[in-house]
Image: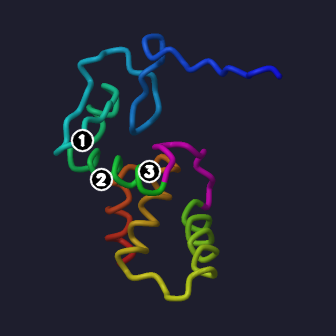
Amino acid sequence: MQQIISKKPNPINASIICDICRAEVRNKASIYHSGVYTRVICEKCLKKFSSNDIELMVNLFTAFGGYFGKHKKPEYILYIILKELKEKSKYRENSFSATEIKLQLLHKALLYGISPEKFFQGLKTII
């Protein structure tokens, strides 16, 4: 009987990727400390987003998966996001609370490359 031995990736040669956009991080000084967690954030994301936005985005991606700009922006992004949310609600016994809806919408917006700042600006114009 043969034993299959799987090779584990060598952590020394492994790429370090940004927790926001999944870009390779070459500058090891880009390690971001937030509370008890240590995150790796690329220089581009550090310049682009505030520390509050980074914290929010990392927490949403940890909770729901994905990364910033994972999907291409279609022309009717809001329609697509709301349609996906409606599909999710079909399988729930209770309806979503206002906070859950905002978090789900924000997470979807981030996946399509919409920054938290632009998302909340858009939300203010609708409400």
38 and 70: which is toward the camera: 38
Q: Total marks drawn?
A: 3
Q: Which residue is under mark 1? A: 37
Q: Secondary structure at mark 3?
A: loop
| Highlighted magenta segment, given as a residue range | 65-76
Please name which of the two marks, 2 or 3, marks the residue nearer to the observer. Answer: 2
Where is residue 87? Give x, y as percent. Answer: 64, 74
In the drawing, does residue 39 fall left or right of residue 20?
A: left
Q: Report the magenta stretch's main SS.
A: loop
Residue type pointed to by label 2: Leu
In the drawing, does residue 60 fall left or right of residue 81?
A: left
Q: CA distance from mark 1 to mark 2?
A: 13 Å
In the image, residue 74 above or below residue 9: below
Q: Which residue is under mark 3? A: 114
Q: Which residue is under mark 2? A: 56
Q: Secondary structure at mark 1?
A: strand
Residue at horizontal 32 percent and vertical 30 percent from the top: 40
Please name which of the two marks, 1 or 2, marks the residue nearer to the observer. Answer: 1
Residue type pointed to by label 1: Tyr
* Image quadrant assignment for residue 85: bottom right
**What color scheme is it?**
rainbow
Q: Secondary structure at mark 2?
A: helix
Label 1 Cα crowd, 10 Å radius (few <14 / some 14-19 / many 20+):
few
Label 3 Cα crowd, 10 Å radius (few <14 / some 14-19 / many 20+):
some
Q: CA distance from mark 2 to mark 3?
A: 13 Å
